[in-house]
Amino acid sequence: YLANLREHGSVRNSATRLRRRDGKEVWGMETVNLIRDDQGQSEVIQGTLMDFTERKQAEQALLLSEARLEKAQRLGHLGSWTWDLTSRTLFWSDELCRICGVPPGYQCHSFADFLEHVHTDDRAEVKAILAKAMLDHQPFSHENRMVRPDGEVRTVLNQSEVVVDEHGQATALTGACLDVTERKQEERLEQDRSLILKHVAQNRPLTEILSRISSMLEIQIPGSFCSVLLLRDGRLWTGAAPHLPKAYSDQLEGLPIGPAVGSCGTACFSGLTVITEDIATDPLWDGYRQLALPHGLRACWSMPIPPSTSGDPVLGSFAVYRDHPSRPSTRELEFMGMAAQLAAVAIEHRLLNDQLSHQAQHDALTGLPNRLLFQDRLDQALAQAERKKLQVAVLYMDLDRFKGINDMLGHSAGDALLREAARRLQACIRKTDTLARLGGDEFIVVLSELNDPQDAMRVATKLIEAMRAPFHLDRHELFVTLSLGISIYPEDGLESDTLMDNADAAMYRAKETGRDNFQWFAAELNALAKERMNMDGQLRQALSLGQLSMHYQPQCGADGEIQGFEALMRWQHPILGAVSPAKFIPLAEASGLIVPLGEWALRTACAQMVAWHQAGHSTLRMAVNVSAVQFKRADWVDTVRRALHDTQLAPDALELEITESLLLHSVSETSANLMELRDLGVGIAIDDFGTGYSSLSYLHKLPVTTLKIDQAFVREIGLQSLPGQEDAPIVRTIISLARNLGMCVVAEGVETDAQRDLLLLLGCDGLQGYLLHRPMPVEQVDLLLNLAGKT
């Protein structure tokens, strides 16, 4: 390169394609000069770079046009023309005459005559291009639309040049025309398809998308009227008919499908394309032609809209109408097939979106609105009630004792019960009201536009009555009742969340008053809820602040000797004083705090029993209550094992008390945990026995060591009984049952001599109650044990 430069002094490169830093591609022409000083001692290379991107692009466009023209000429689709500027006559070749739809040999005798064949929207541009060509005598290329005598529009690509004489005067214009109508249609078709798919992705309204598809096909098949009919519940409904006479398309609403129901109904029935060349004579239209003929419709080509999965029913039909008898060409059928496929994509996308939207706003099990949709409906009802100065009621409902049924019979039966409950509840309300399932066995209703709150009471009564009828599931007859709470807008709250919370509080009050009833919200319930919330926060800090302690109630034998203790948790609040376990234990269970509190109680009780053993009371046993929340945890047995290991308490000195109702919940899991605990050597006691629904069929299979008679049955001892009946028959039965199953029996709540005497007479192994000893702190137990040891 340098040698060449020194020889010639200058080198000019050919066009070079370059890429700028921003990624854009450009073309440049480089010229390099070699400059020497006078003595020839030094040389400087100087270069210039000229940007001729636009010129290069023009050359490429011209080459492309020429290539297209050459290809068209080879295929025989190229027309030519000459415009004699002297005679002002325009001569067209036979091929160009065919393209423009005029007889061979046709001539235009003036420029105005030629412009009559040019589309009105293109005339100004054609005039400007020709004027420029006459001015600079340069070749030119352009597209314009020509209108045939029958009205059909064709698009042509012109490659033209100016002919000049020896004096440089223009004498003629000559050129070649390529008919690019099909190519332009394909480009437009691809643009329309891309736009339609974009609108589908954007979730535009289905009617808008189907109308655009119809309009797209009307452009590809000039003189046609297109429509989309959607198949729903065995009938056809208009999805889009942008240019069909509205009076005609309205008559198609609800059109049935069948073997001879016009073109569309027949196409949907058969799943095949149906071509009706003349509506006036086709037998398929015998019962329907009077719908179409008055509107000037004579031909109908109908194609079923295919589903994405083979075997599924068609989605509807795509129809093309003409105002004269005609049959579609192969290309027109291809256009229809493409349009039907696009319509299928749009319809199935909308169906999927609707399904997902329904799933997001409805309960999968019952099909009822879920919390999200219910809150929206409630907000709408409140806004309307505010405008009309009316009232709204919120009814919060919970099925009583559903969990026990669900655990005993399994989730399948529980689901069936919930579906039937939803059906019964739905039948009790108006169509303008909303019933929702919030989850589990909780349902909620909004009653809108009420004039009198008593209307809410009447609906609540209907709902409760509807649930009292027995449920028949498989071979079981079940009875489930309803607890219901009512809050009223605006008296009980102005916002949806407040009304729902208040109705929930009233529902819990209904449960506390015996279930199977409804309760109105009262302000004191709200105060109670706030009190419970505050107490929950304080309970979370009680352990770390040392406010919790353990008290121990002795369990005694027949002679009053102490056999062991039941560990009982106590909370001494600095302001509230002694907080009842009946108040804070349920709160701890509901919040999950019972898990750390229960483990602390277990470890504290075990450590205390070890201390008493070391003090010489080695025969004592410790009973510790276990919450269902603790017992169901997968790590509960390991928690007990660690507590025994860390405190060094012998397993047979520990007895865990579980409630009878726990035996009903997850029987297999409960049984497995009990077996593991017995394998450790830990005793198992059933607390409050007789108040639940234990099944004797599996009670004898569980490793239970002790039955504790609930104090409610102990209180019956000594009360007046009916003539001929024994005193306290339930207590007698429980003791007899325990004896037969090889279990020990401990009676709780012993408060009178008569109770103690009968229990001992019946063979009760242990007694516990205020008659013997109250629960006491460690210091008092130490004194009691020391006193007992001295005696």
Image (cartoon, rainbow, N blue to C red):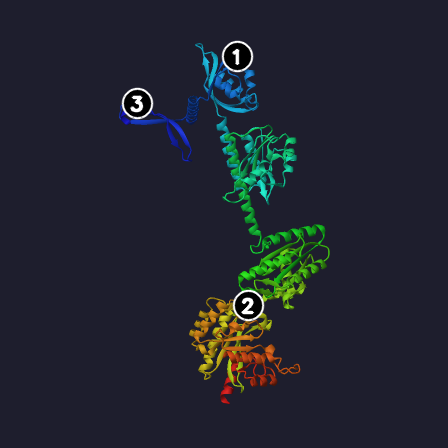
- What amino acid type is highlighted by mark number 2? Ala
Which residue, given by chain and number where applicable, does mark 3 sit on? 9
Task: Tell me which amino acid carries mark 3.
Answer: Gly
Q: Name the one closer to the observer, 233 or 552.
A: 233
> Residue 637: x percent and y percent?
45, 70
Q: Earlier in the sequence, mark 1 or mark 2?
A: 1
Residue 88 numbered tag: 1
Could you tell me how far apart the alpha carbons at marks 3 and 2 are, in whole angstroms? 98 Å
Q: Residue at x 73, y 57 (%)?
A: 452
- Graded by Cα atoms within 10 Å as few (under 14), some (14 to 19) or many (20 or more), the crowding at tag 3 reads some
**Residues packed near mark 1 inside 10 Å, few (<14), some (14 to 19) or many (20 plus):** few
Q: Are marks 1 and 2 in contact (CB under 8 Å)?
A: no
Q: Which residue reaches farthest bottom?
A: 791
- x, y percentage for residue 739? 52, 80
Residue at 53% x, 61% y is: 411
User: What residue did someone put label 2 on?
Assistant: 588
Q: Residue furthest front?
A: 283
Query: Quick one: label 3 or label 2, which is nearer the N terminus?
Result: 3
